[in-house]
Amino acid sequence: MILRDIINHLESIAPPHLQEFYDNSGLIFGNLDQSIGGALISLDCTEAVVDEAIELGYNLIISHHPIVFSGIKQFDPSNYVHRVVVKAIKNDIAIYAIHTNLDNVLDHGVNQKIAEKIGLIDCEILKPKTPENKTIGSGILGSLSEPMAPKKFLAHIKQAMLLATIKHTALINKKISMVAVCGGSGSFLLADAISARADIFITSDYKYHEFFDANGKIIIADIGHYESEYFTIELLFKLLKEKFPKFAARCTKVVTNPINYY
Ligand SMILES: [Zn+2]
């Protein structure tokens, strides 16, 4: 497999121009013409993930989050980002990130995968980038075929998304039917979730004061950043395997979540 073919396929689903201005999706290290023996897929490109790729003899890491966001002037071994990049370069392992461009597409995007896990139907983008194209934008809105009591629904997502815990606002005494979802940090979409009449907003990275914004109008459920995007690994794996069935691709076995629960 040539790296260019792998990237072209992924970018036919999530074009790079759909990434947010602050993002650094794309090829971070590597040569488009290089031959790829195997790809390791992860949410984060950590040193342990690079070690795993070395052990497997793979020379490509595809991660959701870019390891490099801004310019690096000196490579400092005490900095974990720098260590990861240096190790990858020394071992000739290409690093590719597919981040907010994969967040911003409806079809085969991060949020559609979450919606699929939860069992949402009739999904659409929660906040489209433009009124003309409702398949590009932030978050997803979908409904449950069978409305569920809030507690039952929390138990359901806990099981479906493999969650250790859910931080949530006061439960509203009404069955959950409309569900808004945003993988990763989604608090900027709360007003859209409320105006779309969602009963619950599932996302992560909520701050204490932001929880008050639920204001009795919606339930905010913070399921954790890593947990919310965990199935993106499976999504990328399937996208590669469907197109290139014989290509060696694997999902990382490393739990890259920096947060532990006690
Ligand atoms: Zn994320």
Image (cartoon, rainbow, N blue to C red):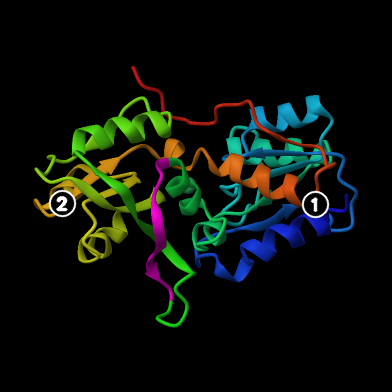
Q: Residue at x 36, y 52 (%)?
A: 181
Label 1 environment density (alpha carbons within 10 Å; few <14, some 14–19, many ≥20): some
**Alpha-carbon distance for marks 2 and 1?**
45 Å
Q: Magenta region, mostly helix, strand or loop? A: strand
Q: If the image is split into quadrants, where does the C terminus sit?
A: top left
Residue where numbered disc 2 is placed: 214
- Label 2 near ligand 1 (CB < 8 Å): no
- Label 1 near ligand 1 (CB < 8 Å): no
- Residue 107: % across, % down: 55, 61
- Residue 205: % across, % down: 33, 44
The span shown in magenta is 118-129
Q: Which mark is residue 132?
A: none
The image quarter in which residue 108 lies: bottom right
Label 2 environment density (alpha carbons within 10 Å; few <14, some 14–19, many ≥20): some
Depicted 214 relative to depicted 253: above or below: below
Residue where numbered disc 1 is placed: 30
- Residue 145: % across, % down: 33, 49
Q: Amino acid at mark 2?
A: Ala
Depicted 110 relative to depicted 138: above or below: above
Please state if 232 lies on the left or on the right of 143 as rendered.
Answer: right
Q: Residue at x 43, y 79 (%)?
A: 130
User: Please, which residue is most extreme toward the top here?
Assistant: 262
Q: Secondary structure at mark 1?
A: loop
Q: Amino acid at mark 1?
A: Gly
Please state if 78 lies on the left or on the right of 205 as rendered.
Answer: right
User: Please, which residue is most extreme toward the front here?
Assistant: 146
Indicate yes or no whether the magenta region holds residue 229: no
- Residue 117: % across, % down: 45, 41
